[in-house]
Image (tube, helix red, strand yellow):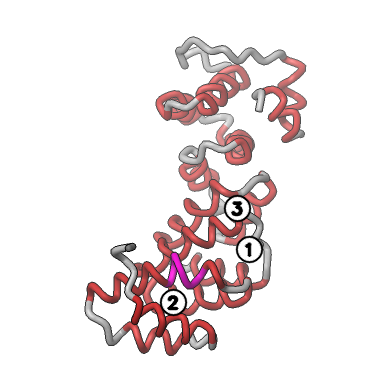
């Protein structure tokens, strides 16, 4: 049996969730011991939230994270991200907008939410939308997050974000080197593209990706062209 499962706790939480009584949930879990509280948090994220409809999911996330983001945000975001990835939840829904508006007020919470959501977003447009609604507008802040996400959509968003730094050669070099050190094939190919695009001869490596000059202009304007060049 799951060591994090407590039948009595689960039954009470399920009852309150079925009534959308999130204040009742908070009142109940405040009566628990530290160990029971952790178990309740796990069950809320792993068992209760996956069974909720979209509106109730976002409402639950807003109430619990507003009360104690440190205790609930990461656990709930894992389920939210998974459900967005499989199409059960929608990033641009009214509930999501309300939740993101709440989360963006704290820099740490904003970063945690972004790092859970970015890997499941399948389009650069969704990534740009998320950054805008989390108030992550500075190029360097976006870059710091995107460097850690090994997906094709994040890679293209990163490539586009680098335009703000095209005159900062040391930053471009560090970016390419970080991608190489990340150790995955996507990062290595992206580093090769950045090296070619910006003429970074200082970046050393044996690259299998070879980009022709005519392809570079297409990549600037087309995600499909980027995917074609990167051989996704």
In terms of depth relative to the viewer, which is nearer, 75 or 207? 75
Quadrant of residue 101 within the rendered picture: bottom right
Dot 3 alpha-carbon crowd within 10 angstroms: few under 14, some 14 to 19, many 20 or more = some
Q: Position of residue 20 (x, y in %)?
A: 54, 85
Q: Position of residue 52 (x, y in %)?
A: 57, 73
Which quadrant is the C terminus positioned in? Answer: top right
Q: Position of residue 127 (x, y in %)?
A: 62, 49
- Compared to residue 93, the image places residue 140 above or below, namely above
Q: Position of residue 226 (x, y in %)?
A: 70, 29
The span picked out in magenta is 44-49
The residue lying at 45 percent from left, 13 percent from top is 204
In terms of depth relative to the viewer, which is nearer, 29 or 129? 29
Tag 2 residue: 64
In terms of depth relative to the viewer, which is nearer, 20 or 173? 20
Q: In this view, does 230 lie to the left or right of 171?
A: right
The residue lying at 51 percent from left, 30 percent from top is 168
Tag 1 residue: 89
């Amino acid at each position: 049996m799951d060591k994090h499962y407590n039948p009595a706790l689960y039954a009470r939480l399920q009852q309150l969730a079925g009534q959308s009584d999130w204040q009742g949930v908070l009142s109940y879990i405040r009566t628990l011991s530290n160990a029971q509280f952790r178990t309740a948090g796990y069950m809320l994220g792993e068992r209760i939230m996956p069974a909720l409809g979209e509106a109730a999911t976002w409402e639950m996330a807003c109430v619990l994270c507003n009360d104690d983001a440190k205790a609930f945000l990461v656990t709930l975001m894992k389920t939210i991200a998974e459900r967005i990835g499989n199409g059960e939840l929608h990033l641009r829904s009214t509930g999501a907008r309300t939740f993101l508006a709440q989360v963006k007020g704290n820099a740490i919470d904003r970063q945690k939410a972004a790092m859970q959501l970015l890997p499941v977003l399948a389009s650069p447009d969704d990534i740009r939308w998320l950054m805008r609604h989390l108030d992550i507008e500075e190029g360097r802040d976006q870059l710091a997050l995107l460097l850690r996400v090994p997906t094709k959509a994040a890679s293209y968003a990163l490539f586009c974000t680098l335009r703000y730094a095209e005159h900062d050669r040391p930053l471009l070099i560090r970016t390419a080197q970080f991608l190489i050190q990340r150790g995955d094939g996507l990062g290595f190919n992206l580093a090769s593209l950045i090296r070619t695009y910006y003429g970074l001869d200082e970046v050393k490596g044996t690259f299998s990706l070879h980009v022709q000059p005519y392809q570079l202009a297409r990549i600037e304007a087309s995600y499909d062209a980027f995917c074609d060049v990167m051989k996704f």
